[in-house]
Amino acid sequence: MTVKILIDSEHHRGEVDPRLFGSFVEHMGRCVYTGIYEPDHPSADPHGFRGDVGALVRELGTTLVRYPGGNFVSGYRWEDGIGPRADRPRRLDLAWRGIETNQVGTDEFLGWAERAAVTPMMAVNLGTRGIQAAADLVEYCNLPGGTHWSDLRHRHGREEPYGVPLWCLGNEMDGPWQTGHLTAERYGELAAQAGRAMKLVDPSIELVACGSSSHTMPTFGYWETEVLERAWDVVDHISMHAYYEEHDGDRRSFLASGVDMDQFIRGVAATVDAVAARKHSGKRIGISFDEWNVWYQSRFEAAGLPDIDVAGPRIEDTYSALDAVVVGDLLISLLNHADRVRIACLAQLVNVIAPIRTDPGGAAWRQTTFHPVAAVAATARGHSLVTRVTAPELYTRRYGDVPAVAAAAVADPATGRVTAYLTNRGDEPATVEVRYRGPGTLSAESGRVLVADQKGPRDREAAAGFGFTTLPVSAGTDPHTVTTTLPPESWTVLAAR
Ligand code: AHR
């Protein structure tokens, strides 16, 4: 198979927002307890957070972390998680049937985020609570002092406001599984009222309204329209969530997950723009893709309700090489919509469908999916370039004909570096000629490739032996081209200057 890719530095979509490399910490399973936080762990810092996990979070390049849920937030009383730890209640969490000990709460999380140099993105409970609790939490976090909640923060040892810049107005409120699930009309009203109160406390914050939990929801499209009709003036972003898995051994469709993500993003952008047009508004609402990943959700659904426990494991998917290639393909989709998607969170960060796993009291390790995420976070700086891919099509059961090769490219005006990301979705090698139009010439540097092993074991040993290998790249027919051969079912990073 022969493929041509044209990258033109003159045609870009604007800056890649660093918030695209976000992640998500939910009070779910072992994400918090024995994930980021384990006071008895040998690597724990004076605040009880694991140093080995912190080092991997830095290596992953995470820029932003959403907290504390997820479905968990829809039953959460944030006041339970502040003040002296001995006085904090143990609560039953209805979302994941866990006992929440509240040993980690707002101050602990925000302190960790500050030390980890990640932007916190907090969610408020619009399921079982509402406007007042949401405004109070903004006051606790962001007001300098002189009020009940900000003074309480002082008494809890934190004088400086945290200045949390981003807030989610609830979580997946379109989903019948959500505690306090609402119709689009009622959620739109509530989001408008809660958002207005929160911005009266701190007008500098940005707000994310819940969009659809997936584009397969029966209300998809209708939901976004009705919510934005009501909350337009206060919200800055609308959320999207999507999880992918291999269904019935259909590897080919799974490898084309980025095609589905592209279509979902285009659908949400068009819906948002239609509301803008009807309102005669020049406001540009961004997209916060604040949950995305590979998740074998069908296995989780088949397992039924878990027993009630304290921080017992929940959805600790172990990923294969194939899953890592798919995560790479999804990252290509996010980069290709960088003009619209301003925030994205790989769900989640540790243990729960996560790139990082831990043993309680023991090691922290990288899953296969860690590698593409870290590679993009480390290199995708600057402008998202428009790429033109001329490739044969492959037939997939779920998406019909799809391009055999997907590509995204980013150019950093500060360094002149161009980085291209390529997925070969097919099961034969693809000879690729990359032509670059722009200042300077494209000189061949070797690429780095992740290959989906056909046998694809999903275990810890397989993950430990998995990673990038070198991909030879040669000069093309003129100084503006390079050629390389992408292995079947692979994901590649090509850096050129
Ligand atoms: O990330 C796991 C769960 O998936 C989140 O709690 C929820 O928002 C989504 O359905």
Image: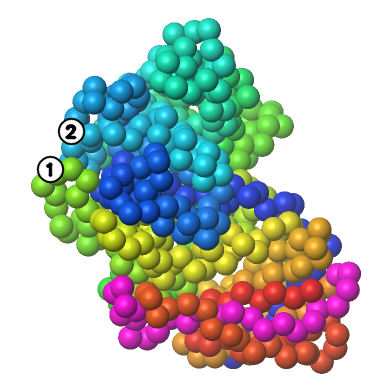
- In the image, the residue with mark 2 has its CB under 8 Å from the nearest atom of ligand 1: no
Q: Residue 221 magenta-drawn?
A: no
> Looking at numbered disc 1 in the image, what kind of residue is underneath it?
Ile
Left or right of residue 124: residue 437:
right
Picture residue at 80% right of the left edge, 82% below the top = 443
Picture residue at 22% right of the left edge, 57% below the top = 300
Labelled pair 2, 1 in contact (Cβ < 8 Å): yes
Q: Quadrant of the N terminus?
A: bottom right
Marking on residue 92: 2
Residue 108 rendering spot, x and y as whole percentages = 40, 34
Left or right of residue 444: residue 429:
left
Q: Secondary structure at mark 1?
A: loop
Picture residue at 37% right of the left edge, 48% below the top = 44
Looking at the image, tell me whether mark 2 or mark 1 is earlier in sequence order: 2
Q: Is residue 362 above or below residue 312?
A: below
Marking on residue 308: 1
Most extreme residue toward the right, as rendered?
Answer: 439
Q: Quadrant of the C terminus?
A: bottom right
Residue 112 rendering spot, x and y as whole percentages = 46, 40
Q: Find the magenta span and give its range.
A: 438-462
